[in-house]
Image: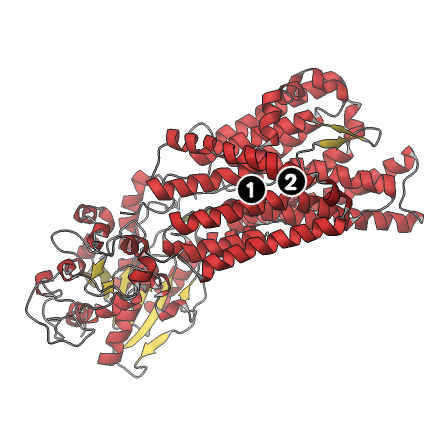
């Protein structure tokens, strides 16, 4: 069976941006000198990030390496641009962007091309379209925006990790390269208008200009940091992946570059002590911050300021005789620092692709894979990165460099588009037409006289709640939906605004079926309630019911406060929405029956303290939440059918089935999984108006809970029913609900 998406890797994927290997920094006199310590600092950052990705337990905060690189970029690029302004009186945007194109795009394009080719043969064919789209976004350096959207998209939360997901940081970096020189140029032009010139001729004038630019960067940093705090609190993925919310980190590096002259005049002992302190704080950040901490937020201050202090401690040439600068200038550190960009590009695809080939790997195996990625990293650095970066013809020709960059981006995008339009064949192609084998059917029985899409012996009366699984003969034929289309086989309420996303609290009327009916059924809960909408809609059409949809992603019916992992905070929108729905359903226009369910979670918030609740206490709170919800309905004499949750496969079923078409039962849910408290509906026993409804016998047999039943693909992802199969359950749900109606 395919491994559960993301298993074996940290939940949050944090990568490093690219930085120029030539660590030339401004000097007090306005020139430049090579900063070997900055090159070594990149080694610290890349080691932290790679260590985090392979799962080293002592590096829970290794993802802060991204912040280290953002500060380094701000330091180096600001120094370069300010030096150009002070020496030439202008900033050549085209020349700056041409340098970036030569430096970054050849190696990145090579990785995108190689990874796309390997993905075609290694990754499940169903993932090819998604990976192709990831490659296209990476080619145009908007991966960070795509990542933010996907991180807040409930439907994408089960997706397998992309081998080019790490290009999000390159997106932030390239957007910084686009905006930063414009900021420096505009600041210089404003100063020039005041003094009728741009060129700075005297040290005194330069001090004034440096002060003005520092003020601009401080204002920018404060605004960016404030935005980062706000978004970290409300919608963390956009704070993490957004360039505007990361700009303050670049600004910190820029302020260090501007202040080099003053910093170099500090006592040597102060600089040396501050460098040691900076290293200590940075190491502490890597060891103490973890993926559960809202980030960037205030937590990012520690690695960002520590990096700024470390860089500042080496401001004078004499600083490299001891302390942090000497340690960072050690030749092994510098050697790894030179490879940091290339290793960054190669290590994550290596981890993702090998995991797809061999399944979940332990930490030692992942360490070996990451270290082996140094081989293509070194080769790419030696034969691609350096030669093109310093190629004389390209160095002389700004137009040639920009043309090369544009061509490489276009080529990478085309490669991604090809993977999107022509996904892998084999299992995917077969899955679109292969009938489910007869010996894979759950039921056995005589030839069916039911319609082509109706299970035999389904019945339509108000007898027992469920049928014996042995009595069911599911219709056979081509697998439907196909694994390739299963993810899009959603209830219509996902497309018409009736199933609410995480930020939404207001809901439209969402009435379906017979609007004049005397029987009103309300569907209430999270996405595991919404999956039953196609079933209820079919019942409503046949039996002239009115169905009202009240569902919201990640917001179950029990009155509990959810800790939303993507948002890194209490899911307040869920509480607001649920309270509103409960008030509506308990009002004068009471429904005939409420159908409620919810996916049990251990990610709850203790309402008395506002803190995240321990997993050991979550079970009791979940039952208490059900008690509160059912008590609210009982107080208004509203009858509720509590649906037992459907079995969770835990693996991506369309991918698994497409890989095991001849024996799809490999993808079954084990029966012992149903012993989990997650499937309990015992809380209905204490409520006079609540009734438990369990359709597990329809979904499972003595061997397990199949991934396919007859011609039907049961699941569209790791836990939700396909809309097609949900409609096939219409007679069984009706049989269970009919006795509960007046």
User: What coloring was used for the rendering?
Assistant: secondary structure
Helix or strand or loop: what does disc 2 sit on? helix
- Residue 305: x percent and y percent? 64, 33
Residue at position x 72%, y 16% in the image? 269
Q: Left or right: 222 with respect to 238?
A: right
Q: Is residue 107 above or below residue 441?
A: above
- Residue 181: x percent and y percent? 75, 47
Q: Does residue 718 appear in this view?
A: no
CB atoms at circles 2 and 1 under 8 Å apart?
A: yes
The crowd level at tag 1 (other Cα within 10 Å; few <14, some 14-19, many 20+) is many
- Residue 127: x percent and y percent? 40, 54
Q: Left or right: 635 with respect to 170?
A: left
Q: Earlier in the sequence, mark 2 or mark 1?
A: 2
Residue at position x 46%, y 36% in the image? 53
The Cα atoms of the two marked residues, 2 and 1, are separated by 10 Å
The crowd level at tag 2 (other Cα within 10 Å; few <14, some 14-19, many 20+) is many
Q: Left or right: 194 with respect to 298?
A: right
Q: Which mark is residue 296?
A: 1
Q: Residue furthest left?
A: 446
Helix or strand or loop: what does disc 1 sit on? loop
Q: Nearer the viewer, residue 628 or 86?
A: 86
Residue at position x 42%, y 51% in the image? 120
Q: Which mark is residue 249?
A: 2
User: Quadrant where the C terminus lies?
Assistant: bottom left
């Amino acid at each position: 069976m395919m491994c559960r998406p993301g298993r074996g890797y940290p939940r949050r994927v944090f990568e490093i941006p690219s930085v120029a290997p030539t660590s030339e920094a401004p000097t007090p006199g306005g020139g430049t000198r090579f900063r070997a310590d900055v090159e070594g600092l990149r080694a610290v950052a890349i080691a932290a990030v790679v260590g985090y990705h392979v799962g080293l337990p002592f590096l829970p905060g290794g993802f802060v390496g991204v912040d280290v690189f953002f500060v380094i970029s701000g330091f180096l690029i600001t120094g370069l641009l300010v030096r150009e302004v002070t020496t030439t009186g202008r900033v050549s945007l085209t020349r700056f962007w041409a340098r970036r194109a030569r430096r970054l795009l050849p190696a990145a394009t090579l990785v995108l091309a190689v990874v796309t080719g390997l993905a075609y043969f290694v990754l499940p064919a169903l993932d090819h379209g998604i990976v192709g789209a990831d490659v296209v976004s990476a080619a145009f350096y908007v991966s960070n925006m795509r990542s933010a959207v996907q991180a807040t998209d409930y439907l994408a939360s089960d997706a397998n990790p992309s081998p080019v997901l790490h290009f999000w940081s390159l997106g932030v970096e390239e957007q910084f390269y686009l905006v930063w020189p414009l900021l420096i140029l505009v600041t210089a032009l404003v100063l020039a208008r005041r003094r009728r010139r741009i060129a700075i001729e005297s040290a005194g004038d330069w001090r004034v200009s440096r002060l003005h630019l520092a003020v601009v960067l401080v204002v920018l940093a404060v605004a960016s940091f404030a935005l980062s705090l706000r978004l970290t609190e409300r919608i963390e993925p956009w704070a993490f992946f957004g360039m505007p919310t990361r700009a303050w980190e670049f600004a910190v590096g820029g302020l260090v570059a501007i202040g080099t002259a003053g910093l170099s005049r500090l006592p040597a002992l102060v600089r040396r002590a501050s460098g040691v302190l900076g290293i200590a704080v940075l190491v502490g950040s890597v060891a103490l911050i973890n993926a559960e901490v809202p980030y960037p937020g205030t937590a990012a201050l520690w690695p960002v300021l520590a990096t700024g202090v470390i860089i500042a401690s080496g401001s004078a040439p004499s600083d490299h005789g001891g302390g942090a600068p000497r340690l960072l200038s050690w030749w092994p550190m510098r050697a790894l620092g030179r490879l940091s960009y290339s290793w960054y590009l190669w290590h994550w695809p290596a981890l993702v692709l090998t995991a797809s080939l061999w399944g979940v790997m332990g930490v030692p195996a992942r360490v070996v894979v990451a270290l082996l990625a140094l081989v293509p990293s070194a080769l790419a650095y030696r034969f691609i990165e350096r030669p093109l970066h310093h190629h004389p013809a390209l160095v002389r020709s700004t137009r040639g460099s920009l043309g090369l960059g544009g061509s490489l981006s276009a080529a990478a995008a085309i490669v991604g588009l090809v993977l999107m339009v022509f996904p892998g064949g084999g299992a995917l192609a077969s899955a679109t037409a292969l009938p489910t084998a007869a010996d894979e059917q759950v039921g056995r029985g005589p030839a069916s006289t039911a319609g082509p899409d109706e299970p035999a012996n389904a019945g339509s009366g108000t007898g027992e709640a469920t049928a014996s699984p042995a009595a069911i003969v599911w219709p056979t034929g081509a697998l439907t939906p196909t694994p390739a289309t299963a993810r899009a086989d959603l209830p219509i309420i996902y497309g018409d605004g009736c199933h609410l996303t995480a930020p939404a609290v207001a809901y439209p009327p969402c009435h379906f079926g017979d609007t004049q009916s005397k029987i009103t059924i309300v569907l209430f809960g999270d996405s595991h309630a919404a999956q039953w909408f196609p079933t209820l809609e079919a019942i409503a059409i046949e039996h002239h019911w009115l169905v009202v949809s009240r569902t919201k992603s990640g917001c179950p019916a029990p009155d509990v406060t959810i800790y939303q992992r993507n948002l890194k905070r209490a899911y307040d929108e869920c509480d607001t929405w649920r309270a509103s729905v409960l008030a509506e359903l308990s009002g004068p226009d009471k429904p005939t029956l409420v159908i409620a369910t919810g996916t049990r979670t251990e990610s709850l918030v203790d309402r008395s303290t506002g803190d995240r609740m321990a997993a050991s206490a979550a079970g009791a709170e979940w039952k208490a939440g059900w008690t509160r919800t059912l008590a609210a309905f009982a107080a208004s004499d509203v009858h509720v059918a509590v649906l037992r949750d459907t079995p969770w496969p835990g693996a991506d079923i369309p991918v698994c089935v497409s890989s095991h078409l001849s024996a799809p039962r490999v993808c079954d849910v084990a029966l012992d999984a149903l012993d989990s408290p997650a499937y309990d509906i015992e809380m209905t026993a204490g409520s006079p108006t609540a009734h438990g409804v369990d359709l597990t016998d329809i979904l499972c047999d003595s061997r397990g809970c199949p991934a396919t039943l007859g011609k039907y693909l049961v699941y569209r992802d790791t836990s939700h029913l396909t809309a097609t199969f949900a409609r096939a359950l219409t007679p069984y749900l009706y049989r269970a609900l009919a006795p509960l109606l007046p």
